[in-house]
């Protein structure tokens, strides 16, 4: 008896320790977010005299309004607002087009196999893994030739082209588990390629559409390399503008504005994560552990 | 005619993607490879002259720093993120009541842009107002933490921020792996009185080898492509102390106007990535076809 109760006592202590450790980890992951939020609500005066980890003595939203509409990104001082909209205008069409193409491709590769379909899939898949540095130079030239250099349609094109590898992979892995008998039966009933896609496969696809849209949106919203390489002064996405605000060397360093800007840039993907985290994680793991 | 169309419609649907990938991925890689064997500077030249650019690259002290940094950063980033991810996954696997909630916290950094992560850590690690100041306020008068501006240590700040961003994701991969281990074997071991630590080290972890491989591939891939994080956190500095191949390539392409160097460094990056990814993809695809 004594032995038993002492071992259950140790067990309890171990569990408490376990929870403490897990909360310490949570603390570690949350600390940067906490610091960002509190810093963005402080005045510059308080930042310079106070401590990084203290709560603001006096909450002020000045830094937020500067970040949104007045902060300088280079020569212009209009805040993040125009760049926020640039990112929206890039991300929404690029996500929609690449998801749609991926759905059709996945449908063909998984259900309408032909002689070369597996090779085409392998070629598409390889494209997901190249370092984009290797296509930057020719892409810049081709965008120039197409008269799309530095434009938002140019960036949409780039994101679509280098997104279809992943979107095809997602849909292919989803459709491959649907038995081919389904298509055979539908064909006997006289349905054609598009009709089967439209009225049988698409209605089944809601979960994978959500996964793909979230994945693509996060990728494109958070992209920096394409944004910085293929945009010009008025067409930059928000990540490029954020980096310009933070690293601008003119004037006084306004850390609170930097932090407010960073939160604004992070907010859309963070919201998506909070609302649909399950699908976000499925995309992440599907992208790495092949469905 | 109509019959032909109907028979070939899957091919017609996938053809645009196929040709896009052929041009924008494989054609572009070929173009970059070609340029890397020429004397191109500001404008591309197409006469092949051999390995001049690669000789220049490997004679360049800056490239040497970039490669060294890649190995330091890659090694530490992968190692720490895997160890941390595994520890958290095992702790979370102990029937924790608020597992879902904690998982959400551990994983949210993956939803952020690396520019946001870099901006946040740049502020936290700020010598003067950041962590250093916190410790000074706590009474450690002589505490200094200037890694961000110290050429010998700045690369480790990239590791700190990178691990913070990616370790939650590794945790999610490992947690899924832990859950997929055959529960019957674990039960049997428990009945036999095998201690929990032994169950982990002798049964569960060895059976997770494929997950370790996937995590390694994903992290290695992230490390080699790392660009945004360095730009936002250190800008490659001080000097070029935190240059990585990706930032080297970008500098050569867009600030120095040295196409030959940009192309040859991009090709080296691709070779490094493919030497990690190709064997993995090959075995994955072969396994799939065997099934």
Image (cartoon, rainbow, N blue to C red):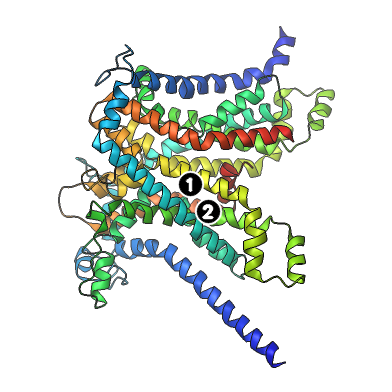
Q: At 65% across and 61% down in the image, what residue appears?
A: B202
Quadrant the N terminus of chain B occupies: top right
Element class at badge 1? helix
Quarter where residue A84 is shown: top left
Query: Residue B210 vs residue B58: left or right?
Result: right
Residue B195 at x, y = what percent? Answer: 67, 71
Q: Which mark is residue B170?
A: 2
Quadrant the C terminus of chain B occupies: top right
Residue B119 at x, y = what percent? Answer: 32, 53
Q: Are marks 1 and 2 in contact (CB under 8 Å)?
A: yes
Q: Which mark is residue B219?
A: 1
Query: Residue A142 vs residue A205: left or right?
Result: left
Task: Please determine whether, in this image, residue A261 is positioned above or below residue B253.
Answer: below
Residue B50 appears anywhere in the view: yes
| Chain letter of disc 1 in the image | B
* Mark 1–mark 2 distance (CA, rounded to whole Å): 9 Å
Label 2: few (<14), some (14–19) or many (≥20) C-alpha neighbours in 10 Å? many
Residue A14 at x, y = what percent? Answer: 58, 78
């Amino acid at each position: 008896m004594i032995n038993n109760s002492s071992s259950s006592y140790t067990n309890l202590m171990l569990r408490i320790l376990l929870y403490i450790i897990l909360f310490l980890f949570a603390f570690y992951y949350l600390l940067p977010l906490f610091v960002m939020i509190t810093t963005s609500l402080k005045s510059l005066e308080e930042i310079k005299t106070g401590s990084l980890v203290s709560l603001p003595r006096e909450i002020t939203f000045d830094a937020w309004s500067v970040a949104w509409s007045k902060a300088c990104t280079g020569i212009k001082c209009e805040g993040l607002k125009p760049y926020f909209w640039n990112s929206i205008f890039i991300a929404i069409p690029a996500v929609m087009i690449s998801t749609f193409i991926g759905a059709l491709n996945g449908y063909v590769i998984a259900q309408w196999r032909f002689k070369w379909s597996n090779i085409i899939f392998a070629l598409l898949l390889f494209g997901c893994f190249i370092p984009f540095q290797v296509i930057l130079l020719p892409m810049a030239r081709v965008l120039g030739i197409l008269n799309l250099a530095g434009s938002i349609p140019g960036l949409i094109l780039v994101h679509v082209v280098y997104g279809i590898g992943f979107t095809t992979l997602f849909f292919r892995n989803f459709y491959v588990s649907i038995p081919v008998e389904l298509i055979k039966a539908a064909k006997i009933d006289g349905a054609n390629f598009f009709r089967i896609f439209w009225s049988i496969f698409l209605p089944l696809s809601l979960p994978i559409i959500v996964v793909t849209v979230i994945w693509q949106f996060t990728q494109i919203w958070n992209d920096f390399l394409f944004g910085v390489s293929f945009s010009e002064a008025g067409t930059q996405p928000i990540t490029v503008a954020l980096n310009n605000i933070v690293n601008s060397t003119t004037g006084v360093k306004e850390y609170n504005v930097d932090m407010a800007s960073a939160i604004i840039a992070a907010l859309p993907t963070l919201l998506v994560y909070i609302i649909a985290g399950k699908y976000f994680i499925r995309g992440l793991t599907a992208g790495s552990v092949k469905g | 005619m109509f019959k032909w169309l109907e028979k070939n419609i899957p091919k017609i649907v996938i053809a645009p993607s196929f040709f896009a990938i052929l041009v924008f991925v494989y054609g572009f890689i070929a173009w970059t490879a070609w340029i890397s064997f020429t004397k191109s500077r500001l404008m591309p030249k197409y006469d092949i002259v051999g390995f001049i650019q690669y000789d220049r690259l490997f004679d360049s002290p800056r490239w040497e720093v970039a490669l060294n940094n890649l190995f330091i950063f890659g090694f530490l980033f992968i190692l720490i993120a895997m160890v941390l991810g595994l520890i958290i996954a095992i702790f979370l696997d102990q029937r924790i009541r608020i597992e879902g909630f904690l998982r959400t916290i551990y994983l949210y950094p993956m939803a952020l842009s690396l520019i946001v992560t870099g901006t946040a850590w740049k502020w936290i690690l700020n010598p003067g107002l950041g962590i250093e100041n916190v410790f000074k306020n706590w009474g450690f008068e002589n505490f200094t933490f200037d890694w961000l501006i110290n050429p010998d240590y700045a690369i480790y700040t990239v590791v700190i921020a990178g691990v913070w961003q990616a370790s939650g994701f590794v945790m999610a991969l490992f947690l899924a792996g832990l859950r997929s281990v055959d529960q019957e074997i674990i039960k049997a071991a428990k009945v036999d009185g095998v201690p929990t630590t032994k169950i982990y080290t002798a049964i569960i972890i060895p059976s997770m080898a494929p997950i370790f491989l996937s995590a390694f591939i994903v992290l290695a891939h992230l490390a080699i492509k790392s660009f945004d994080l360095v730009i936002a956190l250190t800008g490659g500095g001080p000097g070029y102390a935190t240059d990585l191949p990706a930032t080297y390539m970008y500098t050569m392409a867009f600030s120095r106007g040295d196409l030959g160097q940009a192309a040859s460094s991009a090709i080296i990056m691709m070779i490094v990535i493919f030497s990690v990814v190709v064997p993995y993809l090959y075995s994955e695809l072969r396994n799939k076809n065997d099934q």
